[in-house]
Image: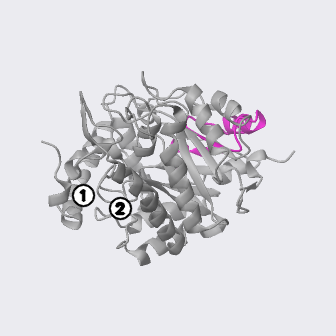
């Protein structure tokens, strides 16, 4: 029997992905602090392409520098380093692979040391304070995303993924926890979805019908008062009426104090297969699921059960950048996941993040920090890049709340 993971996936726009294994969008934090790619980042995505991934998604690529998730992210602004982006796109596309940036705006969750957070509504709760967006701010968003998508196309990336998950700006519009607006961008799920429809329309008009445009959404915010499965399924129905080519389903937010899926010590299998099965009944757009895949059997079962059209791997790809080749082969082979005892909060995520750096330097054989050591190294690097970010993008307009 043919291995379902090795079968190509054809997108509505006509583009063909060579298999069903995708490298999930993760915040690799390998930009130079001024919004540009580094050699280590280029090598990292080259390794995933060499390792057989059909598509690698670059996590947290900012559409503007004012509202970043972290200072190690790329910025697809008009003055970006186009030759460096072209080199990243070229190296991430070897072996027939695709590489797409995940275009995002952190909104209320913008990194406070280098921004003044602003979301759909003004908030002042424990651990989170932000201004509310004006109508002019909102009306400017579609063109901002469209310009970033055009830059991606010009640089040679194979497509783009619009980030509307994990509690960042477009996800905030969908979530009643963040969105308290009483105008046409708040209230019902249809109204909360409005800005996403406008962004997708502007991006499609900018890049044309044949260029892949995907979107990442939450199946749930995993927070009381946040986006529910019911509303998330309605979002999938609404997306079916757009020109989107791929729906990437994930979940959770980075709301202060919320448990992060990426910081869990272990999984009990793929997170969103039940939701994926329901989503596939209300859309003809290909569905990919992100989160919790540790074994090839889990990935195969997800496809065989019609819970998704492709699987998106994060940690597994960090542990073995050639796992896509392994899972398509007769031999198979699952990664050996490390097990940590009482790591500090954020330590597991930092460990995987710093291992990405080791992969980009072809030095993973030397990588052996504890989660605490990885967290300390990650925080030191972020602090240095915050200084570079301020110098590059201007400290005056990035003055944080006091």
> For mark 2, what is the residue?
31
Q: Earlier in the sequence, mark 2 or mark 1?
A: 2
Left or right, 171 with reference to 207: left
Q: Which residues are magenta?
A: 288-317
Judging depth in this view, the residue of 340 and 82 nearest the camera is 82
Residue drawn 23% across the image and 48% down it: 116
- The circle drawn on residue 159 is none
Q: For mark 1, does the 10 Å Cα neighbourhood hold few (<14), some (14 to 19), or many (20 or more) residues?
A: many
| Residue 211 seen in this snapshot | yes
Q: Is residue 94 magenta?
A: no
Residue 311 screen position, x and y as percent: 64, 43
Is the N terminus in the top left, top right, bottom left or bottom right quadrant?
A: top right
Q: For the residue labelled by badge 1, is the local secondary structure a helix, a strand or a loop?
A: helix
- Give percent across and percent down for residue 238: 62, 41
**Badges 2 and 1: C-beta atoms under 8 Å apart?**
yes
Camera-side residue of 362 and 229: 229
């Amino acid at each position: 029997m043919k291995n379902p993971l090795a079968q190509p996936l054809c997108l509505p726009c006509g583009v063909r992905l060579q298999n069903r294994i995708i490298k999930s969008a993760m915040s690799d934090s390998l930009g130079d602090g001024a919004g540009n790619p580094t050699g280590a980042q280029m090598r990292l995505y080259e390794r995933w392409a060499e390792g057989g991934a059909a598509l690698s998604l670059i996590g947290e690529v900012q559409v503007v520098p004012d509202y970043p998730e972290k200072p190690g992210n790329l910025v697809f602004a008009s003055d970006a380093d186009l030759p460096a982006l072209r080199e990243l796109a070229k190296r991430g596309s070897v072996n027939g692979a695709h590489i797409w940036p995940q275009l995002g705006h952190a909104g209320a969750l913008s990194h406070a040391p280098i921004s003044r957070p602003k979301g759909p509504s003004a908030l002042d709760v424990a651990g989170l304070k932000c201004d509310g967006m004006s109508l002019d701010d909102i009306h400017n968003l579609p063109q901002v995303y469209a310009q970033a998508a055009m830059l991606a196309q010009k640089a040679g990336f194979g497509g783009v993924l619009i980030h509307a998950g994990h509690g960042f700006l477009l996800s905030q519009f969908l979530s009643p926890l963040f969105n308290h607006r009483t105008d046409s961008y708040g209230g019902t799920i249809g109204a909360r979805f409005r800005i996403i429809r406008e962004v997708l329309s502007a991006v499609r008009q900018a890049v044309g019908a044949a260029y892949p445009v995907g979107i990442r959404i939450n199946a749930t915010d995993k927070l009381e008062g946040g986006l529910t499965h019911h509303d998330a399924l309605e979002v999938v129905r609404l997306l079916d009426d757009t020109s989107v080519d791929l729906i990437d389903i994930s979940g959770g937010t980075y709301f202060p104090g919320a448990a992060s899926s990426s910081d869990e010590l272990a999984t009990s299998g793929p997170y969103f297969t039940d939701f994926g099965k329901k989503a596939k009944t209300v859309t003809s757009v290909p569905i990919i699921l992100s989160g919790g895949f540790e074994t090839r059997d889990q990935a195969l079962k997800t496809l065989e059960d019609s819970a998704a059209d492709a699987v998106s791997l994060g940690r597994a790809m960090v542990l073995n950048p050639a796992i896509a080749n392994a899972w398509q082969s007769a031999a198979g082979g699952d990664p050996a996941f490390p097990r940590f005892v009482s790591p500090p909060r954020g330590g597991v995520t930092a460990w995987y993040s710093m291992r990405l750096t080791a992969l980009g330097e072809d030095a993973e054989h030397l990588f052996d920090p504890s989660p605490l050591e990885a967290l300390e190294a990650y925080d030191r690097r972020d602090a240095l890049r915050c200084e570079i970010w301020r110098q590059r993008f201007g400290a005056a307009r990035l003055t944080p709340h006091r």
